[in-house]
Image (cartoon, rainbow, N blue to C red):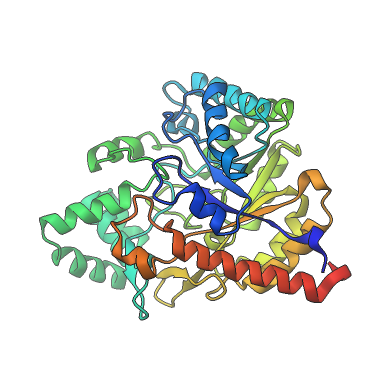
Amino acid sequence: MNKDALLKECFRWYGPNDTVTLQDIVQCGCTGVYTSLHHIPYGEVWPREEIRKRLDQLAPYGLEWTAVESVPVSEAIRTRTGDYKRHLENYRQTLENLGAEGVKIVIYNFMPALDWVRTDLAYKLPDGSQCLFFDPAKFAAFDMFLLKRPGAEKDFTPEQIAKAKAFFDGLDDAGKAAFEKAILDVFPGVKMGVTIESFRAMLAKYDGIDEKKLREHYKLFLEAVVPSAEKAGVRLAVHPDDPPFPILGLARIASVEADFRQIVSMVPSPANGICFCTGSLSARAANDLPGMIERLGDHIACFHFRSVQRNPDGTFFEANHLEGCANLPAVMTVALKLNAKRDAAHKLSVRPDHGHRILDDLKKPVNANPGYDCLGRMKGLAELRGLQTGIAFTMGDKL
């Protein structure tokens, strides 16, 4: 078996308040974590002493801080409004501080306004497990009847609009409040208390920012921070849009292979890389995941592995890791081939993503971080471990 081809196995950890403990993560067989300093507000500097505290928390468990997930890009930077110049300087300093403490991969995204979006955070599957689910008709209900975005109806089909009205009319006041919160308050690792009113104000800052303008802002961001990443020995890794298609009338610019080719060519540098998330990308049928990995190759800094099941009506849900539309056996094969070519300092890591809520986790209080209960992700990791071990064993020197 070609052990040099194996991906480093990691878990996402949300810090000391995470209900999944570092001991849990060790028992799952991981050697590293993807984690962030969620207590530091967006746009502020991460001091070296705070970075060291996180490293000191990991050290007794023998866990590496494999990747930062993430150093958020503030709305001010994306829209180039308000305090964006100070935020850019703080971002540069944070990268230098991380590099000085030996943390070398930084994941981020450039999704405007919202992070990832789902309409159901505890969708019940036939086996009784729960998963994250996206329904365009329910999202239409949010967009048209809660947010009341002008022109929203143009983005949905008549059938979706009819379903949206039926769904929304069936909600009482408590149901509407819970639905609103499920859409707006899922920023990873932090509850920002976003309301409909504050979200409307956030969206207003994107007036006049079309796809071309958002790409211009993105390039200016990269031009500002990539030199600092190079200086610090840090590799930036952009996460794909989730879902990988336009929502709320906002542009999406990290959804298909051409987007990533444009991103890495904006500021060519080994420090300008990609976090390849198979779940986000598999929500778009045209994305050829194995081919994208082969062609993007050296630009990939790390992996998120999961799969979604797309349905004909436009809905999708988080599938078991080896099911759904992502074809993870084919993805894993090309990922291992890519990793086998890397030198020891640039080996790739992977974490399972958005696991199902199963078994005893169903009896526990709802996790503050939907999709990140322990047991479902441990199941996903076990599936990925068996998959990569089997491929490495059978292919051997062919990797």
Looking at the picture, how far across and down is residue 131, in whole percent? 39, 66
Task: Please tell me which residue is depicted at 62% across the width and 67% down the height of the picture.
Answer: 384
Q: Can residue 305 be seen in the rendering of this structure?
A: yes
Q: Nearer the viewer, residue 183 or 69?
A: 69
Q: Is residue 359 above or below residue 41?
A: below
The quarter holding residue 38 reads: top left
The quarter holding residue 55 reads: top right
Quadrant in which the C terminus is drawn: bottom right
Looking at the picture, how far across and down is residue 285, in whole percent? 55, 70
Q: Is residue 119 left or right of residue 77?
A: left
Q: Is residue 58 left or right of residue 337?
A: left
Looking at the picture, how far across and down is residue 278, in whole percent? 59, 62
Q: Can residue 283 be seen in the rendering of this structure?
A: no
Looking at this view, name the residue that lies furthest to the right. Answer: 397
Q: Is residue 86 above or below residue 367?
A: above
Q: Is residue 76 above or below residue 64?
A: above
Task: Please tell me which residue is depicted at 70% across the width and 43% down the height of the picture.
Answer: 264
Q: Is residue 332 left or right of residue 113?
A: right
Quadrant in which the N terminus is drawn: bottom right
Q: Nearer the viewer, residue 385 or 112?
A: 385
Looking at the picture, how far across and down is residue 240, in whole percent? 56, 52
Q: Nearer the viewer, residue 146 or 21?
A: 21
Q: Nearer the viewer, residue 268 or 155?
A: 268
Q: Is residue 53 left or right of residue 296?
A: left
